Amino acid sequence: MPGVKRNRDGAEKSKSKDGDAPTGPFMPMFEVFRGELDEHHDRRERIIKASRDITAASKKCIFSLQRVRALNNDIPPKIASEVMEKSTAMASQFAAIAPDLAGINAWRYQRQISGGIQEYMEAISFEHYLRNQKLITHEEASKLLPEGVELTGDDYVLGIFDLVGELMRFAITTMATTGSLPGSKVGEGSAEERDILMDLRLLRTSFEALDTTSCGGTGLGKDVEKKMEVMKICVEKVETAVYGMIIRGRERPKGWIPDLADDRAPVESY
């Protein structure tokens, strides 16, 4: 019979009006599935792209902040302007993907956005430390993210792990250019000094006290061992630089700035 195709058993096989695509009672259901999958992939790609852009902007913020040479002070206007520009761009990117991360999607796409959030966490915690010589809290960091973008405990801790590397670079660069370890008085009217090495040692102690035995399947459980080792190396590099500055400082005239060229090599290899 013209216009009718038969399968191998001789039964008639229905055709669509255009004569190309088969039709049946299940086709509308599969078309819904296809639409949902297309929407999922589009959403996933938007989040991945935004995460990469946020990561790149965060790195630029950190690069600018590494030019600061004093703790517990306002950021120099030119550097503050550069950081504000990048922060505004990142806020717009976060706001654009906030609807894609609503509800259960916050966990569905956690892996795609996690890298960008951790890098952003590293940048804002570094700026907060330079301004206040204090560690930003999870609550303070969460308030800097647009509504709808969640800062998980894992991303917060992993971002602080990465912060140690930036503090190491800042400490060694400042010692090389000023001849002194950056630090400030603990409080107004106090004679007690707290330098960056003391803060790094406190961070190391706190990290080593973490119990991550129950975090095996999370991002923290997967990355903590590697980041813990890197963190310890960073603190040891600052300790070595300080020891060298003290020892050589005693052998040189007052006002001499130590040459930390020997310490610069391991920093670049980090």
Image (tube, rainbow, N blue to C red):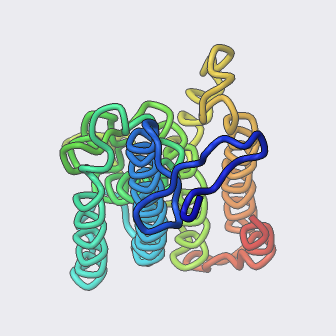
At x 68% / y 64%, what residue is drawn?
245
Quadrant housing the N terminus: bottom right
| Quarter where residue 183 is shown | bottom left
Q: Is residue 209 above or below residue 103?
A: above
Give the camera-side residue of 36 and 231: 36
Q: Position of residue 257 (x, y in %)?
A: 61, 79
Q: Position of residue 69 (x, y in %)?
A: 42, 72
Q: Is residue 57 above or below residue 229?
A: below
| Quarter where residue 243 is shown | bottom right
Q: Is residue 228 above or below residue 217?
A: below
At x 54% / y 41%, what residue is drawn?
158
Give the camera-side residue of 181 and 205: 205
Quadrant housing the C terminus: bottom right
At x 76% / y 79%, what residue is drawn?
261
Horizontal placement of 56 versus 90: left or right? right
Give the camera-side residue of 14 and 87: 14
| Quarter where residue 58 is shown | bottom left
Q: Position of residue 220 (x, y in %)?
A: 60, 33
At x 61% / y 45%, what residue is drawn?
12
Horizontal placement of 170 versus 245: left or right? left
Instruction: Determine if residue 109 is in view.
Output: no
Q: Residue furthest front?
A: 1
Instruction: Determine if residue 228 is in view.
Output: yes
Give the camera-side residue of 35 and 244: 35
Q: Position of residue 123 (x, y in %)?
A: 41, 60
Q: Residue furthest bottom?
A: 78
